[in-house]
Image (cartoon, rainbow, N blue to C red):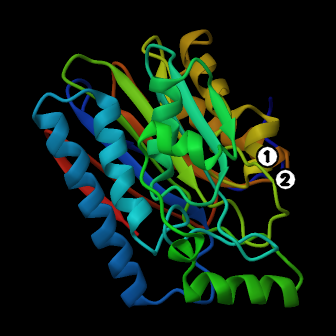
């Protein structure tokens, strides 16, 4: 697809090493918003660094890629600055309704959507992948969550005053898209295997039951050892319409595009479908990519040659 004349510019940079252990993370793309402060940005960067350290330490120990992805996401789900786990955006009826997906390079995948009591939604996605014969559960029952051995909290645990304020503003001020903090990670381990995970609270004031791209394999999350691992963030409806994550992988595998070029082309496609946002992309062989066509993106990466965080 050709680039729309009015498409926003895609900003991208290479991340990590050509080979060896590498971890990329993101914590949302969009506009900084009127509530952004230097103090909040500093906290975001501190939490990004903690997430990088948690995941990368496992890679150094020889853990598989998905373990590093989960460890990094745990830190971000527990940090109220991000729109996942504690601090998730609130639906139109004032509850936290969360989605997550975990996919490994061998094509195995698990996802949940609409969970409201799972402390770390990425753990429920892992449980679906590893403990069931299915791929996705919508609003799993309390008994199913208990059988999986996944920790829970009452819905009030996830709700912060900042998110209550965001919901009130959205419901009184025209309900514009609010872009804040969907999180994700992609990793490559010592064996060259890759994995991707994404976790989100959706968008402020979304209708009850709305599902975005994050839990949908191929839309917001994808991994294949024959190509790349991808985690997306932004206006989920647009990423769904273009099957963004899988399109990146296909462009790399079948069209021979570089991960950087593929990410840029897909974000142009997202823009043509009334969306913006970003993604992290990590090939089984080659350097990773940070790419976004919004005002900003929270991200970090680490490999043997160094690391970077930006909030």
Q: Which residue is mark 2?
A: 274
Determine the secondary structure under disc 1. Answer: helix
Exactly how many numbered labels are in the figure?
Answer: 2
Q: Residues within 10 Å of mark 2 (few under 14, many from 20)?
A: few
Give the farthest residue toward the right.
174
Q: In which quarter of the view is residue 2 placed?
A: top right
Of the pair 149 and 104, the residue shown nearer to us: 149
Q: Are marks 2 and 1 in contact (CB under 8 Å)?
A: yes
Expressed as whole percent of the image width and height from the top left, the position of residue 295 reads 60, 67
Tell me if 291 is positioned left or right of 250 in this view: left
Compare marks 2 and 1 and give the one earlier in the sequence: 1
Expressed as whole percent of the image width and height from the top left, the position of residue 299 reads 41, 57
Q: Residue at x 80, y 65 (%)?
A: 206
Work out whether 221 lies above or below 235. above
Give the farthest residue toward the left.
61
Give the farthest residue toward the front.
143
Q: Which residue is mark 1?
A: 238
Work out whether 43 lies above or below 288. below
Quadrant of image for the N terminus: top right
């Amino acid at each position: 697809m050709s680039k729309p004349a009015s498409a926003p510019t895609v900003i991208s940079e290479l991340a990590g090493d050509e080979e060896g252990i590498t971890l990329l993370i993101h914590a949302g793309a969009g506009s900084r918003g009127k509530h952004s402060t230097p103090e909040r940005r500093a906290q975001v960067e501190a939490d990004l660094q903690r997430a990088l350290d948690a995941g990368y330490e496992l890679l150094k120990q020889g853990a598989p890629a998905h373990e590093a992805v989960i460890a990094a996401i745990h830190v971000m789900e527990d940090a109220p600055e991000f729109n996942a786990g504690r601090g998730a955006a609130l639906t139109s009826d004032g509850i936290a309704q969360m989605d997550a997906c975990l996919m490994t390079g061998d094509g195995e995948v698990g996802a949940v959507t609409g969970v409201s009591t799972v402390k770390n939604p990425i753990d429920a996605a892992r449980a679906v992948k590893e403990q069931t014969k299915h791929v996705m559960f919508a609003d799993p029952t309390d008994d199913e969550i208990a059988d999986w051995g996944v920790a829970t909290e009452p819905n009030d645990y996830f709700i912060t005053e900042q998110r209550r304020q965001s919901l009130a503003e959205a419901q009184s001020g025209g309900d514009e898209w609010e872009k804040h903090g969907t999180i994700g990670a992609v990793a490559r381990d010592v064996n060259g295997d890759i994995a991707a995970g994404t976790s989100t609270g959706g968008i402020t004031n979304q209708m009850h039951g709305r599902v975005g791209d994050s839990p949908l394999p191929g839309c917001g999350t994808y991994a294949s050892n024959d190509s790349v691992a991808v985690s997306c963030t932004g206006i989920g409806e647009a990423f769904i319409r273009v099957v963004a994550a899988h399109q990146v992988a296909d462009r790399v595998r079948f069209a021979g595009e570089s991960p950087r070029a593929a990410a840029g082309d897909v974000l142009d496609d997202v823009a043509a479908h009334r969306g913006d946002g970003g993604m992290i992309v990590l090939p089984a062989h080659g350097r990773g990519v940070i790419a976004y066509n919004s005002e900003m993106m929270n991200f970090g990466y680490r490999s043997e040659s160094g690391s970077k965080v930006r909030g």
